[in-house]
Each structure stands twice: as C-alpha cells, then as structure tokens.
Amino acid sequence: MFHSISAFNNAGFDLFGDSLIGFQDNSYILLIIASLIFSGGLGFIVWMDIISFPKNKKLTRYSKFTLILTGIILTISILFIGLSEWRYGTFNHLSLGDQLANIIFMAVTPRTAGYANVDYMDVSHAGLFMTFILMFIGGSSGSTAGGVKVSTIGLVVMFMYRMFKGEEINVFSRHISYDNVKRAFFIIFVGIIMLIWSSMILFITEEIPHGFGMEYILMEVMSCFGTVGLSLGLTPDLTVIGKFVLMLLMFVGRVGLMTFFWSLGGPKKESKVHYPEMNIMVG
C-alpha cells in the first residue's frame, strides 16, 4: 500500500533502502509501479475524461493533446534508452523480457517519480542525458508530477513547426492564442535560467569526486527542479549553500514556475503610454 501510493503520487519514497534496484529481475513489480507512476503523471482532468469516455464517447481536445504528446515522448524515450543501455550493456545480466521491463521503467520514472531500478552510476551518458530531458519535461498539467509539463513542451514545438511553415497554431480545429504560447516560452526559458544558475552555484560550492564529471551536479539539479529524487550520490554531502539552492528548486518545481514568479510580482498594470513599434535585428 505504501509503495502504490508513493508511485501514484510520484513521491518515490521506498521501504527497501535501495529503491527498486533489487527488483530488476521482477518484471511484474516494475511494470505495476511504472503503470502507477504513468497514471499519476497523466493528470486528474485527463483521467476524468478517460473514465467518462464509455458514456460520452469523446475526449476533450486538451486530453487528446496530452495523451498524444505523452505517447510520443514515452515511445521516443523507450527507444532511445533501450538503444543506449543495450549498447552499454547495463542489463546484459537479465533475460530479454526483464531487460524490456527495466527500459520501460527507466523511461517512465524520470517523469518525477524518483524510483530507481538501477544505480545511475552504471547508466550510459546517453541514458543520463535522456533522463535529464525527461526530468525537465515532467508530467501533465494538473497531475502529481513536476517539470515544465508535457503540454508546455508540445505548444512550443508546435509553434516553432508552424512558424517554420508560416501557418497559424491550430490544434484539433482550434486556434491557440499567442498569450498561451508566450506563457509556455516563459516557463521553459525561466526554467532553463534557474537550472543554469543553480548548476553554476553548485559547481563552485560542491566537490565532484574523482571519476565523475558535470553529470554529478546536473543530476541533482535537474532532479530537484523536476521533483524527481534521483541522485548520483551528492545529496548526503551537500554544503549548506547547496541544500538551500536545491530546496528552492524543489519548492519552485512543486508549486510551478508561473505561480512562484507571479506571486513575487504586483498586480498587472495597464500602461497609459503606447509607443510606436520597432524591429530589432535578431539571429
């Protein structure tokens, strides 16, 4: 019961001491936990639509958008992690079925779950890089997951694609407002800035052990921002400054970037003076 609640709420707490590393050869446990993590990361709005689908025979456009994006991200991450860890030999000691279960779990758990089925010091650099990306993206809006959210990434990618083709941003026969797109860009940009500054501070304050590189710090920073909980071992040795930086990242990652920064600002004021437009050369 403890682990089912922890998985669904993307908490990542365990009672074993080594997370789920001892269950590498138990595909049943890994896939059940992965399903709970995935379910919690979909969001309650999407689940309300799915539950009512047999009666209404339709899904809202937001739910369809979220489910399609989630499926694409999950498929790409499984393929990428599968290829990288198969080449690296991370799960060579397991049967083919158990290897597949572990790869699926590795593609699901960075979406802010925090459960580890492998010691990440034994994971390839390609696998770590994909883990960083998944931790940054996180789950769906209105879910138990953190990150910048799937729909945010989807809007930005769609905007760039449509802009390249010179078309308006439409989703399922509905136009997406530019205010929506601006908020998505704001979330991603501010998130990246926070990660850069936090990493730079930790590079100065924390000591990287021999045999490790930048990934030792980046794993901790990305994990805290996405409220994931994965680590390469830095957590027990953090300095006071490092702890405060990571606590701030976890707090911002949990309440959301928009909520956090809007709470710091005052009420929106309408300017009484409007200046002529100008163009600035970019690129």
Image (cartoon, rainbow, N blue to C red):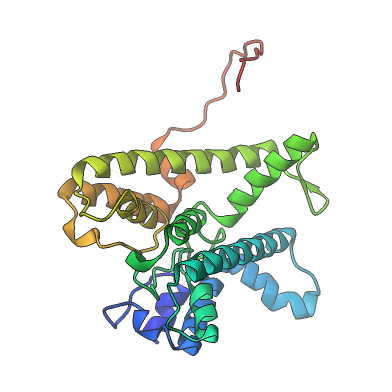
Counting every numbered tag in the picture gives: 0
**Left or right of residue 51: residue 226:** left
Residue shown at the point (39%, 73%) measured from the top left: 115
Q: Quarter of the image holding residue 4?
A: bottom left
Residue 70: % across, % down: 62, 63
Q: Residue furthest right?
A: 173
Name the foreground residue: 74 vs 48: 74
Q: Is residue 36 visible?
A: no
Residue shown at the point (39%, 62%) measured from the top left: 228
Residue 92: % across, % down: 45, 79
| 255 up-or-down from 55: above or below | above
Q: Quarter of the image holding residue 20?
A: bottom left
Quadrant assignment for the N terminus: bottom left
**Left or right of residue 87: residue 245:** left
Residue shown at the point (77%, 80%) measured from the top left: 54
Quadrant assignment for the C terminus: top right
Residue 141: % across, % down: 56, 58
| 74 up-or-down from 20: above or below | above
| 263 up-or-down from 69: above or below | above
Name the foreground residue: 282 vs 260: 282
**Left or right of residue 68: residue 55:** right
**Left or right of residue 42: residue 37:** left
Residue 126: % across, % down: 47, 58
Residue shown at the point (78%, 79%) measured from the top left: 55
